[in-house]
Image (cartoon, helix red, strand yellow):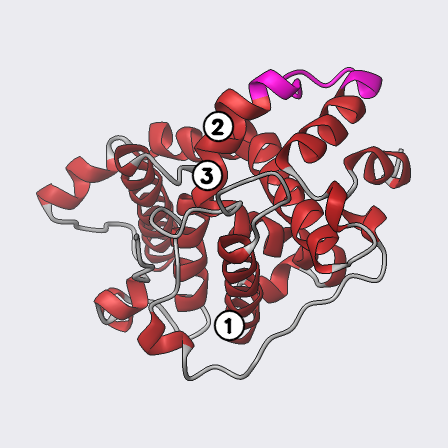
Amino acid sequence: MPDLFFPSEMQDLTKSGMSDQEIPKADLMYLYGIMLHPRDDVARNRLGQGVVAEYVVGRLNELKEISERVKVDADVALSLADAPKLHSELYSAVDGAGFAGAVSGLILGWIVFRHERPDTRASASLRGAFRMVETACIKERIRGGTVDNLRRNVWPAFRPAAHLWAAFQIWTDKFSSGELGTAQGLYVFLMMSEWFRLKGEACIPQRSNAPILDANETWKVRPGISREWPTCDLQCGNLDAWDLRIRIKKRPR
């Protein structure tokens, strides 16, 4: 039952030179690490190092504009030696997990919102969601979208963070990317992701004996924090919003 512990909760980031505007961005990078590698602690830590290295390099460059010589601790210099490699790994992870992560969010939203409505509840199943994705991928010649690959690899790998990807799907449709890097934006995003998590952990499709999400593996906001939040209720008036086939048709060419 992994809990989210954001960098700003674990240490005073202002002592590292971060401003109040930069701190939510550091928390967001931590969240992206979980979304990209929900089951891989080592890869997630590497991404975290890459983000920190990029931040420190940026700060050093700013100082170099003020002073010709900038002295840094030997340990810091050693840690920055891998900065280009870590930076490359960060963007490679985004490219590699972008499709699988986004698909996991669509699968969860597709099932949850169909299960919410009596007239579509019978069609709300993993198998139905997998077929929806496969049909879209075959038509658009997108690799990795077969039912077998989704069932064996994509869904199991990203299921612990599927609720975060589902919330991200809504965010990219309704809000600007810049807003997500603010304290208020991150707060709203986490409320939406918790709604999807709770719905997924309670959603048991027909002819199934287990919920869509496993409460023992999903990343979650600690109850001591989320219980103080106002009630969040998401509704979907257009189920096509979670259909990859239709989303592809509507995307800009």
Circle 3 or circle 2, nearest the eye: 3
Residue occupying image coordinates x 52% and y 57%: 202
Considering depth in this image, is 39 or 94 the residue closer to the camera?
Answer: 39
Q: Is residue 219 above or below residue 11?
A: above
Does the magenta portion include 118? no
The magenta segment is 138-149
Three-letter code for the amino acid on which mark 3 is drawn: Leu
x, y (%) of residue 52? 32, 49
- Which residue is at a point 18% across and 40% down the rendered structure image? 77
In the picture of the structure, the residue carrying the numbered disc 2 is 92
Q: Nearer the viewer, residue 19 or 129?
A: 129
Check disc 1 and give the amino acid type: Tyr
Q: How many marks?
A: 3
Report crowding for label 1: few under 14, some 14 to 19, many 20 or more residues within 10 A (C-alpha).
Answer: few
Amino acid bearing label 2:
Ser
Q: Position of residue 124 (x, y in %)?
A: 70, 44
Place residue 17 in its image quadrant.
Answer: bottom left
Q: Which residue is mark 1?
A: 187
Quadrant assignment for the C terminus: top right
SS category of the residue bearing label 1: helix
14 left or right of 187? Answer: left
Distance from Cα at disc 3 to Cα at disc 2: 10 Å
Residue neighbourhood size for the residue with mark 3, other residues' Cα within 10 Å, grouped as few (<14), some (14–19), many (≥20)? many
213, 37: nearer the viewer: 213
- Residue 58 placement, left or right of 250: left
Q: Is residue 90 left or right of residue 192?
A: left
Q: Earlier in the sequence, mark 1 or mark 2?
A: 2
- Residue at (78%, 16%) from the top-left corner? 138
- Looking at the rendered structure, which numbered label has been put on residue 36? 3
Q: How far is the residue under mark 1 from the one under mark 3?
A: 20 Å
Residue 138 appears in the figure: yes
